[in-house]
Image (cartoon, helix red, strand yellow):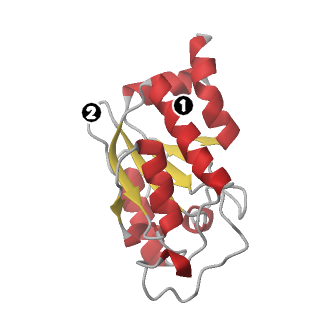
Amino acid sequence: MPELARALQAGGYALIFRHGRTDWRTSDQLPQRTFDDRRTQRNLSEEGREQGRKTGEAFGALGIVFGEVYSSPYFRARDFAELVTAREPVVTFKLLGDDQTGINGHRELLSKLPAPGTNTFLSGHQYAVTEMGFVRMNELEEGSCLVFKPNGDTQRLEIVAHLSHADLLALPAEARLR
């Protein structure tokens, strides 16, 4: 993984995260009519908030820079993006759903080339990446991510890594071993 850490330091990747751990004692009120009321949604647990902070610290220790930061409209995804990047994300419906609209939105954002020296941060859910065949259902744990190498082609997405939260936290230590 030291190679991956060095690659991310150079930029040019898109990282799509499944939001951090949530409080499963609450559930989303579906269909979600508005995304403005966090009381109608499952939110990050304190463990999920800590995952976000620790992930942000790991990226900061490595000097990994995020250019664009996107999030689904759910507060759990927004909050996670902000905790990791210390920036307010651009909220987009493109990171919702397992229907064709959501899949196309994911493809668009994952194929978009980041600005030189930066990576793109996406905070969403597991459904669309499952439907696209990159992971099986429940294989993308809360707080973990998939790393893609964008090439501008929405139909030829190149997955580079699947990182658990533990893998993410290990990146700085492994990078020092080089």
- Label number found at residue 116: 2
Residue at x 48%, y 58% (from the top left corner): 79
Amino acid marked by disc 1: Ala
Q: Quick one: which residue is furthest to the left in this view?
A: 115
State the SS at label 2: loop
On screen, residue 90 versus residue 159, left or right, reads: left
Q: Is residue 116 above or below residue 131?
A: above
Q: Nearer the viewer, residue 146 or 40?
A: 40
Query: Split into 4 quadrants, where in the image is the N terminus?
Result: top right
On screen, residue 114 versus residue 34, left or right, reads: left
- Label number found at residue 58: 1
Q: Dot 1 surroundings within 10 Å: few (below 14), some, or many (20 or more)?
A: some
State the SS at label 1: helix
- Comes first in the chain, label 2 or label 1: 1
Q: Is residue 48 above or below residue 72?
A: above
Residue at x 26%, y 39% (from the top left corner): 115
